[in-house]
Image (cartoon, helix red, strand yellow):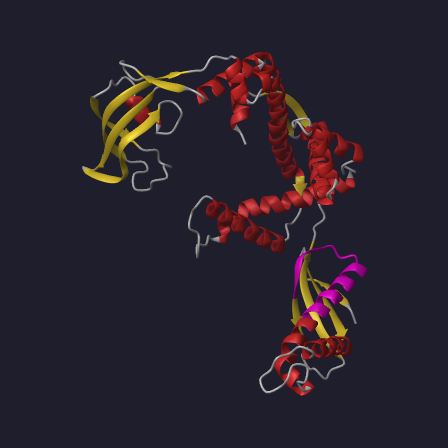
């Protein structure tokens, strides 16, 4: 007898049974297979009596067969009853009598919610736009020149973009503090390596000059011992060097990777690459804006099990990322609640996207997928190889299809919301992820 009880808004309990004979058959077959190669003291391989095999391996094999049978039975019942299962079920064996004809069990699980979509037409959205300008190309060339700058010693006060050589000592309440001392430190002023107030104190100093000044560390400074506190620094400046930028000529163009050193070709390539990058960043920013709009209008209960699983996934991802940066994270753990808000948002978006995409037919069309791959391939010299590389692996094609689906979704949201265009500043766009 199969029954499904409603425990709460999303929680269900399935009551069902499995024929004991089906489990016995699997156990018997596996024990026979194990017996062919089992190595047990006092017996030759392949000659171990069935009773001994049963004693050594029976409990484990029976448990494995039971778990598989439970999963199989649950999936069959869920499918036949059109249950949209969210996450993994929790099984409870009601009878563990091996002589019984059936194994009675219950499975507690959650189902996906019914999503109620509100009225997007009343949601104000600012779609970010930007048209690349000639000055953007020129500023990018200037940045590339600065990255290739050489430095020459000068006899004048230090100014922004100079490179200086300094010694410094910091004092907190009259005592040196950890990380507050440096000898022979080379700093390019204005690039943000040091705190702004520290760099501001150095500007105007000349070689062989010393200076003492007070400075307050930001409240969110990573060094907790000085965060938000007033300290006193003593700085001795040894040398000032001015930046010398390379000319925009053939050699410079070659250093950027332009074959033949054609300066006009350099500008063309930069314009093309910047246009592609601006487009990419606008898509990412507008996708986030569209997702926030969907979160505002969609109403539904969130499956707790999916959120708990996502918390674990986010936690593991965070640990791996920190380890990749060289941090020692062995035996380190985080409180799950630290990731709950982010995990819940990701689960919500996953449910909303699935609902909207299927309901309104926003899946990627073959011609859209092809167009996206071809556009991406234009950024490479061997574009045809890139296209073949994607076509050779269905998983890669699925990744592109998902990107196309996201673009379709963003367009769908923007078309239905109260959308106005807002031009973003070039630097703000390029500084965003």
Residue 150 quadrant: top left
Residue 228 quadrant: top left
298 relative to 189, above or below? below
Q: Residue furthest right?
A: 80
Residue 354 locus on image (x, y percent): 71, 44
Horizontal placement of 370 versus 240: left or right? right
Q: Which residues are magenta?
A: 66-90
In this view of the protein, can residue 81 be seen by the observer?
no
147 relative to 350, above or below? above
Query: Residue at the location (72% across, 84% down)?
Result: 99
**Is 226 within the magenta?**
no
Quadrant occupied by the C terminus = top right
**Is 75 within the magenta?**
yes
Residue 203 locus on image (x, y percent): 30, 19
Q: Residue furthest front?
A: 260
Tell me which secondary structure the magenta stretch mostly adopts. Answer: helix
Q: For this rendering, which residue is in front, 390 or 129? A: 390
Q: For this rendering, which residue is in front, 304 or 361? A: 361
Quadrant occupied by the N terminus = bottom right
Residue 73 locus on image (x, y percent): 75, 67
């Amino acid at each position: 007898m199969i029954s499904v009880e409603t425990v709460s808004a999303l929680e269900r309990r399935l009551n069902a049974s499995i024929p004991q004979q089906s489990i016995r058959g699997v156990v018997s077959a596996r024990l026979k297979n194990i017996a062919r190669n089992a190595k047990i003291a006092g017996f030759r391989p392949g000659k171990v009596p069935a009773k001994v095999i049963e004693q050594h391996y029976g409990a484990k094999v029976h448990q494995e067969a039971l778990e598989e049978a439970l999963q199989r039975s649950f999936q069959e019942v869920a499918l036949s009853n059109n249950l949209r299962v969210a996450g993994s079920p929790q099984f409870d064996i009601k009878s563990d009598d091996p002589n019984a004809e059936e194994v009675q069990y219950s499975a507690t699980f959650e189902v996906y919610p019914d999503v109620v979509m509100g009225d997007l037409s009343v949601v104000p959205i600012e779609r970010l736009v930007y048209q690349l300008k000639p000055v953007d190309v020129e500023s990018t060339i200037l940045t590339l020149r600065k990255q290739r700058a050489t430095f020459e010693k000068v006899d004048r006060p230090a100014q922004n973009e100079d490179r200086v050589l300094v010694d410094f000592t910091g004092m907190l309440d009259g005592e040196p503090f950890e990380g507050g001392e440096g000898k022979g430190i080379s700093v390019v002023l204005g690039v943000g390596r040091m705190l702004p107030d520290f760099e501001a104190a150095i500007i105007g100093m000349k070689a062989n000059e010393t200076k003492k000044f007070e400075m307050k560390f930001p409240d969110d400074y990573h060094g907790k011992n000085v965060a938000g506190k007033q300290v006193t620094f003593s700085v001795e400046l040894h040398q000032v060097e001015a930046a010398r930028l390379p000319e925009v000529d053939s050699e410079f163009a070659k250093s950027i990777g332009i074959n033949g050193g054609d300066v006009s070709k350099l500008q063309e390539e930069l314009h093309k690459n910047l246009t592609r990058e601006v487009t990419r960043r606008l898509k990412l920013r507008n996708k986030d804006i569209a997702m926030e709009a969907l979160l505002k209008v969609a109403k539904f209960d969130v499956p707790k099990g999916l959120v708990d699983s996502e918390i674990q996934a986010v936690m593991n991802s965070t640990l791996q990322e920190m380890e990749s940066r060289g941090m020692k994270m062995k035996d380190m753990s985080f409180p799950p609640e630290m990731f709950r808000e982010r995990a819940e948002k990701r689960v919500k978006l996953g449910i909303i996207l699935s609902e909207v995409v299927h309901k309104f037919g926003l899946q990627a069309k073959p011609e859209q997928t092809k167009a996206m791959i071809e556009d991406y391939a234009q950024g490479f010299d061997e574009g045809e190889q890139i296209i073949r590389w994607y076509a050779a692996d269905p998983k890669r094609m699925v990744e592109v299809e998902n990107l196309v689906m996201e673009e379709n979704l963003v367009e769908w949201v923007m078309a239905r919301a109260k959308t106005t265009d807002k031009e973003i500043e070039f630097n703000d766009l390029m500084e965003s992820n």
